Amino acid sequence: MPYRSEASTQQSFELSVELGQLLIRGAQVGPQADAQIAYILNGALEHVSAVAGVVGLLKKEEVALAEIVRLRDFGYWQPKELGALQDYFEDVEQYPDPHFWKLRRMPLNREPFCHRREDLVPDTEWYDSEFYKKFRILAKQDATILATIPAVNEEGIPLADDSVYSLCFCREIGAAPFTEAQRDLALYLLMVLGPLLHRLWFSTPSADAMLILDLPLRLRRVVSCLMNGDTEKRAAQRLGLSHHTVHSYVRELYELVGVRTRAELMVKLLKAPPESGDAGMPINRAE
């Protein structure tokens, strides 16, 4: 077992406790896998100090590169960032991500993997790559964790195929690298979410999830903040918007969904208990 400093061990313990609490709250969201996963993944961003991420379903045959089958983004993606992500996956072979490319070559369908970018790719190769220059700078993202596990069914039993579940966390440019404890937490989180991911990828999305997906991107970003328990002021800071703008978006959400309070909104969208001081806010609250 690798040596861990006392500080690193303490951080791992604290992160494990926080993750356990998050998983408990996620299970209370409702029976729908998509709603639970959305709540848990957006909450997990806080615990690993990430700004965005992607969860996916991959196929990995013995000698072939891992292929992307399904993806779902979460977190606080700006329109330009989402555009960069979509452009990348259209040009994935022409502008290979050095980190993801190396991961794609591994026998992912045999055992769990989890690596930070610097665990696999040196700085020179990373920052000199056309991928970083073309996509990561535009997306304003740098540090990355990539985790994969062999796909499992709802009972946690490995599937008899080449399916792989993946999880990626990203930090903004200029942020510190992920710690070993945060890397370990990402893998543990993915392993815990395995049965839920099977329900997500192999079943029909719930009406609640479809309602969220049908929202405009600007409102989806606000919903992500509310799912994390953010107040309107905190959401405004996180999204780089004014409090007035976020408040207007929340009012628009209320009108679209047909509710008058934040508590009703959470019940309608995710069946989630409200966790911030805005829980009882009426729609006509003064600025």
Image (tube, helix red, strand yellow):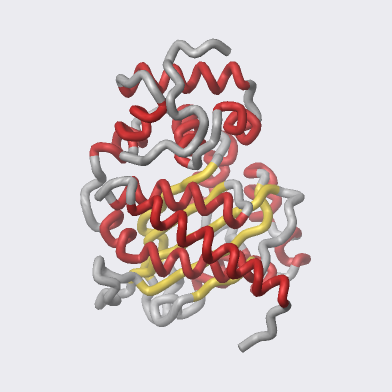
Question: What residue appears at the point 56 percent right and 56 percent down from the top-left corner?
Answer: 169
Figure quadrant of residue 201: bottom left
How far across and down, in percent of the image, does residue 215 sit?
38, 29
- In the drawing, does residue 224 fall left or right of residue 60? right
Residue 145 is drawn in which quadrant? Answer: bottom right
Residue at 62 percent across and 65 percent down: it is 98
Please give the name of the residue rendered at 45% of the width and 34% of the height, measured from the top-left corner.
223
| Residue at x 70% of width, y 50% of height | 133
Decide: is 13 above or below 277: below
Q: Is residue 231 left or right of residue 61?
A: right
> Which is more toward the observer, 252 or 128?
252
**Residue lying furthest bottom in this view?**
1
Is 65 above or below relative to 38? below
197 vs 280, left or right, is left
Quadrant in which the C terminus appears: top right
Find residue 220 and report its horizontal and vertical position in percent. 45, 33
Q: Which quadrant of the figure has residue 151?
A: bottom left
Task: Find residue 261 and report its horizontal and vertical position in percent.
Answer: 39, 22
Residue 259, given in percent of the width and then of the height, sits at 33, 21
